[in-house]
């Protein structure tokens, strides 16, 4: 069969339920060897080369509910050459294991979050498959756990409203709607059972219409009563304990219909010095709560996989960044040997949006469908699922700083809450990353950091969790801007002063970093941007907006600095497992055996190896070991493996250089990463040197706000980087400019910023080359927000920055 599958047969069969077998498409045929065009760039472009080979399409059905008991999934009149894959049909393992977390492939007895996969429709036509999936009837009994009278009343109203029935079964046929209407009329006498009815096609619109006015009135009375009690309680608290006003304001108000249970996946707390005493004795007390939600729209293809099954061998084409994880889980789900699984990684357009473990779930579902049918299967995640995957993680960061008059921070109290959704395999990695980055490059005299990763019945937070420390840098740099405004001290001087440990400290600061590099970066940016003169001028500028009648623009200067740590020693996956093998062949060529590197790093590695061994870069080739089960056990982004593998490549080439004139070719050298002797990290006490390597960066931004349009205009951006020896300056600058462009599209709500000029400077260094990582994402958003804050003389607590926030602040002058 060609790319377009044959249309579905018109002869209807009985309903396919979750307990059915789907025998029509699961009949095994004689295995045929299928060859795939290796030039295909994306998995969604791959098709069987043999025109007679039938391709099946898989479409995922998602749960419309956050919690509840899953009764059934049904599709009426499903054609004979289509089948419904549900959890009870999974042949062996029904979950994916990521670290110590087991995540279901498909919901079986209960649903845990909105958007959870509950079934997969498989068939020869993509359009018909999609329409069948959308027509599925999902029956879920929601569990009610009312805690108050208001909460007990609210769910009953939702259950009886006809809109709920329409949402669950939006694609009902007219015949089904008519039948449901008749059923509702017949069930009018059975009102006592309404609260226990499944949320499916049996809505009770008649009952809802009869009781709507009564229940609505009852609910309003309860809400008003609850609100009155809350106000009265708050007033009493203010009268009796005025010191608790800040805590009271920070506590979110509960609503009458709030029923979402929360729980803690993991937490991390560490402290240093007497932070409470120092805070109370400080001259200034600066408090802010930041809620950054930077989201970079993905321009890559949706998550998914193309899979073909040939006898006992399965070949998977997917943009995975964790081949070993995928291979192990597919082997478990299909109960086959890992050596029988061949993984062909396709183009990863955006590694930050790649879902790591969720990619494995989708590939496993496609593999099961291919195994059952012995046919190639293409599974592309639906738009709703892609939207969930790309949704930014929700983080709230509270900063309290006690500051002396000279600008020295004597106390920092930081509380971070991450809302991670239903599953979070990397909870420990998230808590530690945020804790280490919570105070950025600075060393207050005393500090207390608390990080909690909170779970709830929401879609698992995926996008941005691997680089979540960028949000911590935004918060601390915005806090430093507010401290500078409060104390009247130059922001650059304030940062340099607080990057040096206090001479009065009895013990060293718990997080050991090369903070002296911050001084070099600041000096470079001072000269590049003329920061001090402009900051002082704009602070005293008579044209700064002071009234709504002013037509002069308001200008501001912003600064932010950060580090990017790679190779965290406390990682639960143990990044020291990285290995690399390099062979110099008999003809003098060089073979690097490794997982497929990203396209941008291939020419860098070729030139790096050729310079060490004095050979032509054309003699360097790569042998992909993803195919043979020898790929790294670690994901390629979670521990900064590009930088680490570059270091291993250097060691391997140096080892070959020592042996090439002493013993005959071929020579093979295999190296493993070792921890430097001078780097000690105590995971339990959370102190020492946390990273194998750190790169440093800073950004300055000059912003002008038009008082008529209320839109910021960037007059200039200046970037300074200290990342050791730069192997490919041109490629590094291209990568930085790409990150800058992503941020300019996302830092303002609903608009893209266009800077007049961008200047990038690398500080020359003879140190080992380091990975740039997320330096631009950690510094530039805060620099732009701080420039806007300087222009408005008001702290910006969130990104993207809303236009109406600027409007309100300008109009309030």
Image: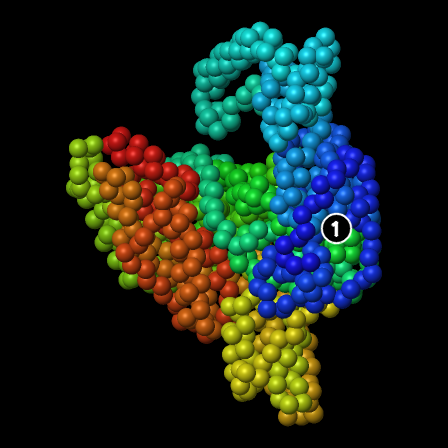
Residue 146 sits in which quadrant?
Answer: top right
Q: Is residue 761 visible?
A: yes
x and y, in percent, of residue 463 in the image: 55, 47
Q: Residue at x 68, y 34 (%)?
A: 136
x and y, in percent, of residue 262 in the image: 63, 32
x and y, in percent, of residue 387 in the image: 55, 43
Q: Residue at x 63, y 68 (%)?
A: 38
Q: Residue at x 56, y 66 (%)?
A: 598
Is 330 rendered above or below residue 798? below
Q: Is residue 465 left or right of residue 407?
A: right
- Image coloring type: rainbow
Q: Is residue 274 left or right of residue 142?
A: left
Q: Which residue is mark 1?
A: 369
Q: Which quadrant, please, contains the C terminus?
A: top left
Q: Residue at x 63, y 26 (%)?
A: 174
Foreground of the two, 512 or 38: 38
């Amino acid at each position: 069969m060609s790319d377009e599958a044959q249309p579905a047969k018109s002869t209807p069969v009985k309903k396919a339920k979750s307990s059915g077998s789907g025998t029509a498409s699961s009949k095994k045929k004689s295995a045929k060897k299928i060859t795939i065009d290796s030039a295909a760039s994306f998995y969604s472009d791959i098709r069987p080369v043999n025109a007679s080979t039938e391709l099946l399409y898989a479409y995922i059905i998602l749960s419309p509910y956050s919690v509840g008991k899953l009764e059934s999934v049904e599709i009426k009149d499903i054609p004979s050459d289509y089948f419904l894959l549900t959890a009870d049909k999974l042949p062996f393992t029904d979950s994916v294991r990521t670290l110590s977390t087991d995540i279901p492939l498909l919901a079986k007895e209960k649903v845990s979050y909105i958007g959870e996969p509950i079934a997969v429709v498989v068939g020869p036509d993509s359009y018909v498959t999609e329409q069948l999936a959308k027509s599925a009837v999902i029956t879920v009994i929601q569990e009610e756990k009312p805690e108050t009278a208001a909460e007990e009343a609210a769910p009953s109203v939702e259950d009886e409203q006809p809109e709920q029935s329409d949402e669950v079964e939006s694609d009902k046929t007219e015949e089904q709607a008519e039948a449901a209407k008749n059923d509702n009329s017949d069930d009018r006498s059975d009102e006592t059972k309404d609260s226990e009815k499944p949320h499916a096609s049996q809505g009770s619109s008649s009952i809802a219409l009869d009781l709507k006015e009564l229940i609505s009135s009852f609910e309003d009375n309860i809400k008003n009563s609850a609100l009155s009690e809350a106000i009265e309680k708050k007033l009493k608290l203010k009268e009796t304990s005025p010191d608790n006003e800040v805590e009271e304001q920070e506590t979110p108000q509960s609503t009458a219909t709030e029923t979402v249970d929360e729980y803690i996946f993991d937490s991390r707390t560490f402290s240093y010095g007497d932070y409470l005493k120092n805070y109370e004795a400080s001259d200034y007390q600066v408090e802010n709560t930041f809620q950054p939600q930077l989201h970079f729209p993905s321009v890559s293809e949706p998550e998914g996989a193309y899979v073909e099954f040939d006898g006992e061998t399965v070949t998977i084409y997917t943009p995975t960044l964790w081949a070993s994880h995928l291979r192990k889980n597919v082997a478990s789900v299909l109960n086959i040997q890992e050596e029988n699984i061949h993984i062909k990684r396709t183009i990863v357009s955006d590694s930050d949006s790649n879902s790591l473990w969720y990619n494995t779930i989708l590939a496993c579902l496609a593999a099961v469908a291919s195994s059952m049918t012995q046919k190639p299967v293409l599974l592309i995640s639906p738009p709703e699922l892609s939207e969930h995957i790309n949704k930014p993680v929700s983080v709230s960061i509270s900063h309290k700083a006690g500051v002396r008059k000279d600008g020295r921070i004597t106390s920092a109290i930081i509380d971070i809450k991450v809302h991670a959704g239903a599953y979070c395999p990397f909870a420990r990695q998230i808590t530690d990353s945020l804790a280490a980055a919570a105070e950025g490059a600075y060393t207050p005299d005393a500090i207390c950091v608390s990080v909690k990763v909170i779970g709830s019945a929401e879609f698992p937070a995926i996008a941005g969790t691997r680089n979540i420390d960028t949000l911590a840098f935004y918060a601390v740099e915005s806090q430093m801007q507010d401290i500078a405004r409060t104390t009247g001290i130059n922001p650059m001087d304030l940062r340099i002063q607080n990057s040096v440990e206090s001479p009065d400290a009895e013990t060293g600061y718990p997080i050991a970093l090369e903070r002296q590099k911050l001084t070099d970066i600041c000096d470079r940016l001072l000269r590049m941007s003329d920061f001090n003169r402009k900051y002082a001028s704009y602070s005293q500028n008579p044209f700064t907006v002071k009234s709504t009648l002013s037509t002069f623009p308001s200008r501001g200067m912003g600064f932010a600095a950060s580090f990017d740590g790679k190779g965290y020693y406390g990682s639960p996956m143990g990044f020291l497992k990285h290995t690399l093998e390099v062979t110099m062949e008999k003809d003098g060529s060089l073979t690097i055996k490794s997982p497929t590197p990203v396209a941008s790093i291939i020419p860098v590695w070729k030139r790096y190896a050729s310079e060490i061994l004095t050979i032509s870069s054309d003699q360097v080739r790569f042998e992909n070991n993803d195919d043979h089960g020898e790929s790294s056990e670690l994901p390629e982004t979670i521990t900064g493996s590009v930088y680490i593998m570059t270091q291993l490549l250097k060691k391997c080439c140096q080892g070959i250089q020592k042996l090439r004139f002493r013993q005959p070719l071929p020579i093979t050298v295999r190296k493993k990463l070792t921890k430097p002797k001078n780097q000690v990290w105590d995971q339990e006490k959370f102190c020492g040197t946390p990273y194998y390597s750190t790169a440093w960066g800073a950004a300055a931004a000059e912003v002008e706000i038009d008082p008529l349009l209320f839109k910021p205009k960037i007059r200039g951006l200046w970037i300074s980087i200290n990342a050791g020896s730069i192997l490919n300056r041109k490629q590094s600058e291209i990568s930085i400019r790409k990150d800058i462009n992503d941020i300019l599209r996302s830092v303002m709500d609903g608009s893209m910023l266009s800077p007049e000029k961008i200047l990038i400077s690398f500080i020359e260094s003879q140190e080992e080359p380091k990975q740039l990582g997320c330096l631009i994402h950690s510094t530039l958003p805060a620099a732009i927000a701080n420039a806007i804050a300087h222009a408005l003389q008001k702290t910006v607590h969130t990104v993207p920055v809303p236009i109406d926030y600027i409007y309100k602040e300008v109009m309030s002058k």
